Amino acid sequence: MKKHVVLLAAAVLALSALAAFAATDALVGACIYKFDDTFMTGVRNAMKTQMDKEGGELEIVDSQNRQPTQNDQVDAYISKGANALIVNPVDRTAAQPLMEKAKAEGLPIVFVNREPYEEVMKAYDKIWYVGAKAEESGTQSGQIIVDYFKKNPKADKNGDGKIQYIMIRGEQGHQDATLRTEYSLKAIKDGGFEVVELGNDTANWDKVQATDKMKGFISAVGVDNIEAVLANNDDMALGAIEALKAEGYNMGDPAKYVPVVGVDATAPALEAMSKGELLGTVLNDADNQGFAAVKVAVVAADDKPVTEESIGYKITDGKYIWIPYRPVTVENYKEFMK
């Protein structure tokens, strides 16, 4: 009899363990500001991978860079009975009405990559943000330029002790664009170099726009006068490189090279680094942003506490999951190639 009791107890424990690790049946609805953004494609893929592990259902829609479209998509998910929402907002200023839609239904909502204003984050107890501190990426990209100029004094083409640079910014008013621009220049100055701006414009995170803008800068100031290019993301950095290559630069001749730095460490950027076209970039960890967003959504959808233990990521102020940046240079870029 005692043996049967022991076996029964063991079976109950086993079933309890299985239940603890059982797949969720949550439906999570996700909206991405636009699908053809290279970085957010990485986030989307990571979200799918994580949800496959969780065993729930994840639907992801393309907001096509239109905030009204995204608003309608959130309404559609609510009508469909989604258990949680993940939103990469088209416009961070539109986060409040999206939060209010979720709050009215008691739905957890996780914002990704574009941080809502603080007052929005404080207005609801089931709201979280997953992203990275843009000032880190700016500092690290600026430091890559500093290190290059210290190792290569001839990069100062005119020998004036100053870095004549082009800045290609992301989106007008976008927090990441503002901070990456500000902190990259601050890092260069803190590194002991004066800077002289030769050109500065937005290219909306887009490679083609960046190519056009860079061609305009080259026509205006002359390619031989440009000593560095800083771009707020890799797509724009690669666009700038296309314009430089059209002038015979960054194609292997050390005498015809302009150091270009981006942000994101996308696969195309790493490939460009392997060819010596791109000086460096900064890893914006798409995988962990995607993984963390889904983990938070699933735990919250199951009405469980979102804690460091339950999601596996550190949480700041109970709402923020910050994924650190990492500098990617010629010395370590191979570590990041998949």
Image: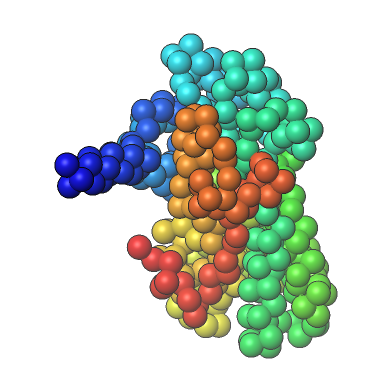
Outermost residue toward the front? 1
Q: Relative to residue 6, is residue 114 drawn left or right?
A: right
x and y percentages locating residue 42 in the rendered image: 44, 48
Q: Position of residue 167 (x, y in %)?
A: 70, 58
Name above or below for residue 87 compared with residue 175.
Answer: above
Residue displayed at 48% across by 76% down: 332
Work out whether residue 330 or residue 251 is closer to the camera in this orientation and state it. 330
| Quarter residue 11 falls in | top left
Depth check: 293 or 114 in front?
293
Is 22 placed left or right of 336 in the picture? left
Question: In the rendered image, which quarter is residue 338 located in?
Answer: bottom left
Along the line of sight, the residue nearer the viewer: 276 or 313: 313
66 up-or-down from 205: above or below: above
Compared with 8, 31 (above or below) is above
Residue 41 visible: no
Residue at point 22%, 42% (across, down)? 5
Residue 316 visible, this angle? yes
Seen at 63% across and 73% down, the residue is 144
Q: How many labels does the image show?
A: 0
* Residue positioned 46% across, 35% down in the render: 298
Colour treatment of the image: rainbow
Residue 265 in the image, given as x and y percentages of width and height = 50, 61
Furthest toward the top, the residue is: 79
Q: Where is residue 186 in the image (x, y as percent from the top left)?
A: 79, 66
Left or right: where 19 falls relative to 119: left
Quadrant position of the N terminus in the picture: top left
